[in-house]
Amino acid sequence: MRIRFHQSLDDLKEKLLVMAGMAEQAIQRAIEAYRTRDTSICDLVMHGELAINKLEREIDQMALDLLAMEQPMAIDLRFILAVIKINADLERVGDQAVNIAERVCDLNAFAAAEMPIDIPHMASVASAMVRKALQAFIEGDAELAESVLAMDDQVDKMNEAAYYSLSLLIKDQPALTAQALNALVISRNLERVADHATNIAEDVIFWVRGADVRHHQSQSQNAAS
């Protein structure tokens, strides 16, 4: 029975990693669509959302079945709970990719204009956070997961800088308001991707250590308070 249970856990993990690959691909495609203004890539992102949503439901059902039938204890229980939460965050990463694709479609209705922000670089950092958080999950590495938390501030600062720069652009060149607002929304979407990566990293730490580090609060900080 225990062998079958742990095989089921492995199957659950493998399915979550498939979900992760789909979510990462969605973000990469959305940013490529932004870079090239290729609406056919946007179509791929939007079509892919259906598969992501379907897989999310399948993973949740697998996890709930394991909780109901096996009554796992301690670290196995934390693993299943972490999978459920990570699954939800990966689905939302896919949602952010769709939002970016929609903004790219809107941008194509207007003349191309140079924006004072580097969207591809911001996307690179946010995507790296997702990959590192998932690597921490694969390896059960809480220290690697902690390194993801430190990266979140970098993306937050990029988003704040984008807001400032684009607000000035709208003020100085009102004719570019539509392009600037779409770029601002894309920046916000990428900031949300980074937030979801942070959530995944926190769930890995919870699984491995049994520690709740939401809001970047470490155990030592808890003890000192």
Image (cartoon, rainbow, N blue to C red):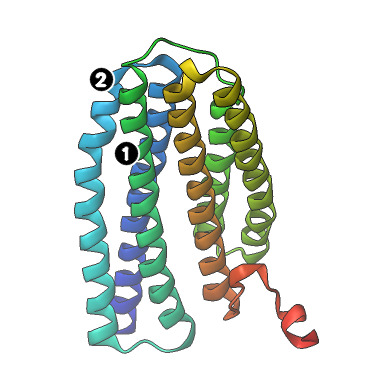
Residue at image mark 2: 40
Q: Residue furthest right?
A: 224
Q: Quadrant of residue 99?
A: top left
Q: What is the quadrant of the N terminus in the image? A: bottom left
Q: Residues within 10 Å of mark 1 (few under 14, many from 20)?
A: many
Query: What residue is at 64 percent from the left and 39 percent from the top?
Result: 158
For residue 203, which numbered disc appears in the image? none
What distance separates the C-alpha of mark 2 from that of mark 1? 13 Å
Q: Percent from the top left, x then y, of residue 44?
A: 25, 29
User: Image height check: is 88 above or below 135?
Assistant: below
Sequence-earlier tag: 2 or 1: 2
Q: As shown in the figure, which amino acid type bears the numbered disc 2?
A: Ser
Of residues 209 and 38, the one nearer the viewer is 38
Q: x%, y% of residue 96?
A: 38, 44
Q: Which residue occupies 29% across, 33% down?
A: 45
* SS for dot 1: helix
Above or below for 74 versus 100: below
Residue to which mark 1 is pinned:
98
Q: How many marks?
A: 2
Question: Which of the 4 quarters of the picture holds residue 166?
Answer: top right
Left or right of residue 71, residue 113 in this image: right
Quarter holding residue 76 = bottom left
Left or right of residue 214: residue 17? left
